[in-house]
Structures are given as C-alpha cells and as structure tokens.
Image: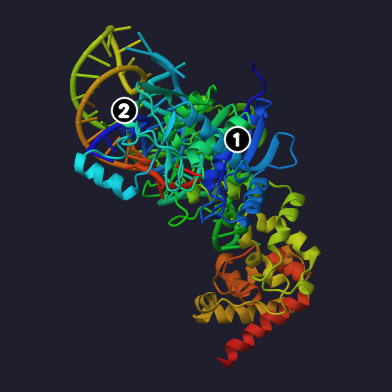
Amino acid sequence: MSSAPRFRFAPSPTGFFHVGGARTALYNWALAKRLGGTFVLRIEDTDEARNQPEWTQGIIDALAWIGVRQDDPTFEGPYFQSQYAEAHIEAAQRLFAEGKAYYCDLTSEQIQERSKASGKQGYDGYSRDRGLEAGPGRVLRFRVPEGQTVVNDLVRGRVEFANETIEDFVLLRGNGSPMFLLANVVDDITMRVSHVVRAEEHLPNTPKQQMIWDALGQTPPVWAHVPVLVNEQRKKLSKRRDKVALEQFRDEGYLPEAMINYLMTLGWAPQGETEIVPWSTIERDFRLEDVNHSPAFFDLKKLAAFNGEYIRAMSTEEFFAAAQPFLVGENIPWIPAQFDEAKFRAMAPLAQTRLVLMTELPMLVDFLFLDEPLIDEDSWKKTFGSPDGVEMLNDAIAALSTGLDWNHDSLKLCIEATGAARGLKLGKAQAPIRVAVTGRTIGPPLFEALELMGEEQVMERLRAAAERLASA
RNA sequence: GCCCCCAUCGUCUAGUGGCCUAGGACACCACCCUUUCAAGGUGGCGGCACGGGUUCGAAUCCCGUUGGGGGUGCCA
C-alpha cells in the first residue's frame, strides 16, 4: 500500500529551540508540503530530569515563527511520547516473548569489569542464554542477530554495518521504562511514519532501530541523515558553547524569512545564481537527493547579510509592520507618548537600508522623539575636539537663523555654503550639526531629518550644543 | 581503541567524465557614487587535501594516504 508520505520531527523539550533542529524541521516540512504528505510533531518527553514541560510551548512557538504552523493541515500533533509508554513496553514484551530480547542483571560496573578483563569494549552478551525473567534492576536487551544490517539512506546511499560491531543494546531500563531507541521506533510505527529525516548524529543508531523495525515485523521507513551544523571549530553546534537559540535570533531582530532561507542554504542550494529565494521556491525544489554530505558552518555573518537583504526587500508597509515589535519595550529610549508615527513613517525608508538587525532601528530614529538627543560622548569629542567643529556650529546657527525655507534642499545648500566659506566640504561641514541634533556622527540622511523635526526644535538643539561648548 | 560518515575559494555552495581557463553568494580589498553611515555599481583576492589507478579525456569513477566530523550511556 502506498499512501501519502508521513514525515516527523521529534525534539525533546530540554531547552531553547536549536537552529539545527529548526533546519531539520524545515527539511521535513518542505518535503511534507511538496509531496502532499504530513508533518508529525512528536515531543520526546520520556522521563529524564532535563525535560521541562514549559519548553514544549517554546518548541511550538519557535516552529510557528519559521512557518511550521500548527493550524496548517499538513501539521499533525503534537504527540507526547510519554503518553505512549504502554505501547513501548508492550512491544518490548513481545520481543522478549519471541526470544528477540532477553533480560540481564549486570550493573554498568560489572559490565565495565568484564570488558576490562576481556579487553573488549562494551557489553559482551553475558546474559543472552541465561534465561532470566523480568525483575527489578534487570534491563531488557535486544538480541542482535548475526549478519549485517544495510541501511539505505536517501542522502548517504547504502551504509553497511556488521552486526558483530553492535552490542546487545538496552530496550527497557532496570526500572522498566523504555529507552529512546525503542520508544522512538514504536512511536514511528504507531504514527505510521514513512520517512525519517534527521541529523547525521543519528546514523549510528539507525541499524539498531532498523533491527527493531524488522523484529517487530514492520517495514522500516525511508531513512535520510542530513549533515550536522558546526561552529567555527568545526564541532557540532552545542547549546552550551554556541549561540543557537532560535528565540534569541528572533529577539535580536532577525526576520523569520531570512532565517528560514539561510537555514535552507546550509547543505543545499537553490538552482540559479542567487541563494535568496522565497519559501515557495524552496518548497517546490528541495530534494533530499541534493543535500550535501559534509557538515556546514553556521555563519552568523552570512545570516546577517541575508537579514539585511530581506529588510531592504520589504515594501514600506511591510517594513513598518515588521518594525512595530522593535519600537516598544525596555530598551527603547523614548516613552510611548513621545513616539510620533508620522515622523517615523517619513524616516523609515531612510532607515531601512541602514539595518542589518531590526534591533538597530531605535538608535537610528530616537532623536526624533526624545526631548533632547542622547549625546554619544565619543562622537561629541571627535567632532568638537577641534576649533573647526565649534566654529562651524556657530556659523551654521547664524546662517540658519536668516529665515530660509525649512526644507532639506535649502538646508543642504545653506550648510554647504557655510562650510565652503570655511574651506570645508559638505561631509565635514554637516558633522557638527549632525552631532548637535542627533547626538551621533552616524545616522540617517541629515537634511531630511532636520526638515522633519522643524526649525524650532533644530535651532534649540544647535543652541544647546553651542552653550555646552561655550561653558566648557 | 572500535564503528560510521565526510573532503571544491576563509565560509556556504554550483558542478554527476569533455561545455571548467572551476561558476555564484558571504567575508575581505580597491575604485565609483555619496550628506555621515549604509545601500548600490565596477573590479580584485581566493579553491578541486595528497598519492596512485581507470579513461583519448577526471573536480567528477576506483583504491590508498592524510585530515576533519559523528557515534560508541540503564541521554535523546
């Protein structure tokens, strides 16, 4: 029987959502969408002190952020592994009854001693034929058959494992609870999973799991092991060492579209000369057969470049909408009442090309809303440390007080002429005004900002700066 | 140690025996544009790990070496 493929993503709720997990989820999602299949979310929450229920919602939220949405008909779940414990144990008992698994009462210390004495690594199958029944402290081990196990992997090809290199692994712990290898397979069977697409670190588990599928009389799924994501040291990305939390990227102002697009180019590339492609293209063209075989470095710089690209590609309205979450909150220097939407809308397009992260937006526009600019002292010193800067400021105040039309063109001409009189090019001449008005040497185009703020406020700030300099 | 995977510019990749003098993107450098900073434009730097085969022909196929990585739990 051939029916629509069923993919699955099976994270454990042990912390923030890992970008590597995000990519795996995206791969599964793209495939499920294109093939008209299903994406099953299963939370692997089986015991272990590390699991925290609150992370589950975090996983669901993070998935939604990258477009893997629960309300989409392709999405199924979440299922919780802990609720299927009975099925896991039942399957284990069946394997025991059929002689495909056996109990063992050796402790890890005893196993180590035996291994030391024999000079061979791992468990030696000591209890294989001892006919032990279930009992407290006794683990159930899988009886690995002779021969070899061949894993047919969609990205790796044919991978052979000699069964003699695989020890009789544990199915049920001494306390009777199921282990990952077993639970994972039984759940996949229960949920009729047809394709297991996961990170390469699971490849060594695969022959074991395939043997369980076989022993349970089931046809194993299609396997696909995608390369891991690594850090600069070429080590697998880890929550401890590396910045990997999707939530953090979201909060720092990365756009989900940029993150999705970037993640998909790690190990795979869309056709053509550009890597910046919409999800619809990814969904249409992504194939496991085209996935690269080597680990990929998660490059923050390139991610940032993608983000800037996506920010610039937005329409004014889209940008305005995307900006909202970054205009409020603790780190915003102005209070909400000071925010002027009209001014922001006028300035937004000028800020848009200057952003890599959305969180950089406030410092580009804050002077528009604050009563007084936030003076960056380094900028101040750099600009007014020489007489040139101070004199230019005074000249500008005089020149701007002659009743000119307050628009950016005439403002520019005025400052240009004032600077020229002192032998300064516009680039130099505008600096003192910029620092006095915005507080910084860098920012959006100055004359447009001056026009927007209006004569009164600008003159006030220029005079305030002059006063500060005079009294210094 | 043992098992498994991998190997194209610094990085992400295109490339599936001749179209490769190896293409693109990020980063970097230079120049142009310019109202600071960006953006944009133009150009540059830079790679098939090594050694053997196979073939008329190899980045592409085979073998080996070296180098990376992953796994080796009563974690998932």
- For label 1, the residue is A8
Where A4 falls versus A361 (above or below)? above
| Residue A154 in view, yes or no | no
Residue A64 location (% of width, % of height): 68, 46
SS at circle 1: strand
| Residue A409 in view, yes or no | yes
Tell me which chain the residue with mark 2 is part of: A
Tell me which chain the residue with mark 1 is part of: A
SS at circle 2: helix
Task: Decide if residue A450 is on the left or right side of residue B8.
Answer: right
Task: Decide if residue A275 is on the left or right side of residue A333.
Answer: left
B33, A148: nearer the viewer: A148
So how many labels did they put on this image? 2
Numbered badge on residue A164? 2
The answer to whether marks 2 and 1 sit on the same chain is yes
Check disc 2: other Cα within 10 Å, few if <14, some if 14-19, many if 20+: few
Residue A165 location (% of width, % of height): 31, 31
Task: Decide if residue A292 is on the left or right side of residue A146.
Answer: right
The kind of residue tagged 2 is Glu
A6, B13: nearer the viewer: A6
Numbered badge on residue A413? none
Residue found at the very far bottom of the displayed protein: A471
Inter-mark Cα distance, 2 to 1:
30 Å
Where A377 falls versus A49 (above or below)? below
The N terminus of chain A lies in quadrant = top right
